[in-house]
Amino acid sequence: MPEYQSWLGATQSNLAAILLRLNDEPGEALKLYEQAISHQQAALKSSPTNIDYRTFLRNHYEGLAEALLATADHADLAQAAAQRSRAVDAYRQALKIGKELAENFPMEPGYCETLVWFHERLGSLFIEMGRSKEAQEEYRQAVALLQKLDGEFPSPKHRQRLATDQSYLGHLLATAGERSEAEARYRSAIQTQEKLVSEYPGVVAYQHDLGGTLNNFGLMLLDAGRLDEARDAFTRAIACQQAALTVDSDNPSYQQFLSNHYWGLAETLLRQGKYAEAAQAARKLASVRPEDAQDSYDAACFLARCVVLAHRDQKLAQQQREETASAYADQAMDLLRRSVERGFRDAEKLNKDADLTPLRERDDFQELLAELQAKDPENK
């Protein structure tokens, strides 16, 4: 009887999902999903219009794709590539069934929401596989579906997800050098997120999301040499993340994003030659997560670059140039020492990083380098 086939398939699928969640025996989970698909197909052959059977089969294909990706993580390069290709095929099967369900039940938004997830997952997978154009297309499909969903079933959840996918598509396009469309996608995402922030001021996650999109947009503008616009984007991103942290001060994601925003602002200001403001941004970067070794290191690099610009500043008298540059160098060294105290151990990077050239002749720099080299003689 078809219901027995379906029940058996569902049981096998549930067991496979448990094995995957436990990160145990992905190969066994893979076999169970393959068996579940076979049983569900047999049930559908007897009852081709049964909605539950079709939904189960869609879910089994999704599970199969995830199991294939899990086995790829434990395989050699050739086997991993083959498993990822099979995962793409499994997701496409899930999409095919999902599209039929969404078309048959247009008043049930859950079917369309699942399609969005499949497109997003495929997009992420294509990025891992180095297939950027196909990743872009999957995110375009996700965006189109979310626009349709928000038009027919308006909700902040749909708009938040739409903005996130627009922003991510913008990132993919910018990385591929397609800046015109990337800018349009970023601006669309920002506009949507600004409305969410305005309509739901108590939801700090919307502030966080907006800050993230502004940051990525700022990085694209920075790369394009549009420095004034980049500076504005990073400044706005900082304000958004600070607002989120005012409510949830210990949130690690908010803290990391704020550090990223200060990094972008410091880099932009340095490229503009505004070293005093860049130094201030660098100190703020170091203060967001004082226990983070990389933040302290990055801030030290920014301050070391300020040393060079201060030495060149003809608006200052010679003595003032020297005093200003020396102060920046001292601050940079303080941060480098803090970075080492917090776990930085890359002596080779410390020795060769061009940003730190203004510090390299200092005795305290050489002492710090020798200390690191002594801890790891092979890393010089």
Image: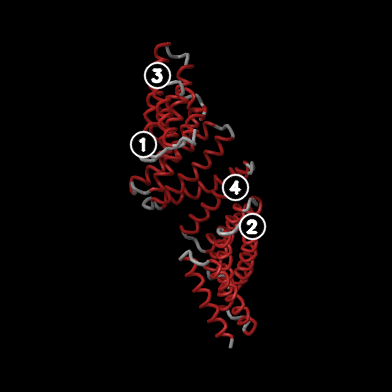
Q: How far apart in space, not on screen, are marks 3 and 1 (Cα)?
A: 26 Å
Q: Which residue does the image show at 45% across and 19% down from the upper left? A: 310
Q: Distance of mark 4 from mark 3, alpha carbons?
A: 41 Å
Q: Which circle marks residue 305 in the picture?
A: none
Q: Return the disc, 3 or 1, that comes first in the chain's sequence.
A: 3
Residue 328 location, x and y as percent?
40, 23
Query: What's the distance in space between the residues labelled 2 and 1, CA to CA?
Result: 41 Å
| Residue at x 62% of width, y 80% of height | 44
Mark 1 = which residue?
341
Q: Circle 3 is placed at which residue position? A: 324
Q: Nearer the viewer, residue 376 or 36?
A: 376
**Residue 31 x/y as whole percent:** 58, 72
Give neighbour class at mark 2: few <14, some 14-19, many 20+ (Cα, 10 Å). Answer: some
Residue occupied by mark 2 = 81
x%, y% of residue 157? 47, 59
Q: Residues within 10 Å of mark 3 (few under 14, many from 20)?
A: some
Circle 4 crowding by C-alpha within 10 Å: few under 14, some 14–19, many from 20: many
Q: Nearer the viewer, mark 1 or mark 4?
A: 1
Marks 2/4 in contact by CB < 8 Å: the verdict is: no
- Dots 3 and 1: beta carbons under 8 Å? no
Closer to the eye: label 4 or 3: 3
Disc 1 crowd rating (10 Å Cα; few below 14, some 14-19, many 20+) is few
Q: Secondary structure at mark 4?
A: helix
Quadrant for the N terminus in the image: bottom right
- Label 2: which secondary element: helix
Identify the amino acid type marked 2.
Answer: Ala
| Mark pair 1, 4: CA separation | 37 Å
Between label 3 and label 1, give the one nearer the viewer.
Answer: 1
| Front: mark 2 or 3 | 2
Kindly indicate the quadrant of the structure image that contains residue 70: bottom right
